Image (tube, grey):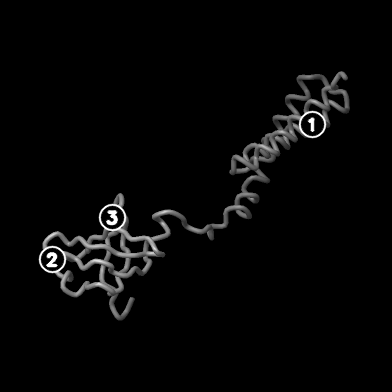
Amino acid sequence: MVWENWQLWLAAGLALMVLEVFVPGFVLACLGLGSFGGAIAAYIDFSFEAQLVTAALTALVAFVFLRPFALKIGFNGSERLSGVDALLGRECIVTESFDAQSGLGRCKVDGDDWRAELLNREQADAAKTGQIVIVNQVESNTLIVSLKTASS
């Protein structure tokens, strides 16, 4: 079977659309749309140079006009946080009292026991086992926490 030019352009466009699933950002989809433009130009029997220009212009139009709308729809800013970013601001329970000198202790978040350090070491006496603390930041494998106040 001999493939015609428009079929090759179409296959390239479909392949790029499928690859877009694995590489977010709507870049490959714009190139795929450009390939579809090249397929239309090939079907009309334009020269190969005209097919390339049509594909490039179609991809450019897709980048300029369609990509911003697709990004607004796909990436609206309400994505769920994961990893240590999801821990910031969370409440955790002290499982091992904090040492007044080092400020170190242990806390449990979602069933995971973490090494923790108090942001304010003067609060070590108040941070006893069972106390609720708030995660302020994460440094390596250590949670930096502060006591939960009545206003938090």
Identify the amino acid type marked 3: Thr
Identify the amino acid type marked 2: Ala
Q: CA distance from mark 2 to mark 1?
A: 69 Å
Q: CA distance from mark 2 to mark 3?
A: 17 Å
- State the quadrant of the C terminus: bottom left
Identify the amino acid type marked 1: Leu
- The residue that appears at 74% across and 29% down in the rendered structure is 12
- State the quadrant of the N terminus: top right
Instruction: Answer few, some or many: residues within 10 Å of disc 2's Cα (few below 14, many 20 plus, some between 14 and 19).
Output: some
Q: CA distance from mark 3 to mark 1?
A: 52 Å
- The residue that appears at 41% across and 56% down in the rendered structure is 85
Question: What SS does tag 2 mark?
Answer: loop
Q: Where is residue 126? Give x, y as percent.
A: 19, 75
Location of mark 3 (residue): 142
Figure quadrant of residue 95 = bottom left
Question: Viewed as shown, does residue 54 lie left or right of 72?
Answer: right
Location of mark 1 (residue): 10
When the figure is inspected, residue 42 is found, relative to residue 123, above or below; the finding is above
In the rendered structure, find residue 35 and report the number of the disc placed on it. Answer: none
Q: Where is residue 45? Give x, y as percent.
A: 87, 23
Q: Nearer the viewer, mark 3 or mark 1?
A: 3
Location of mark 2 (residue): 100
Quick one: label 2 or label 3, which is nearer the N terminus? Answer: 2
Question: Viewed as shown, does residue 82 lie left or right of 109?
Answer: right
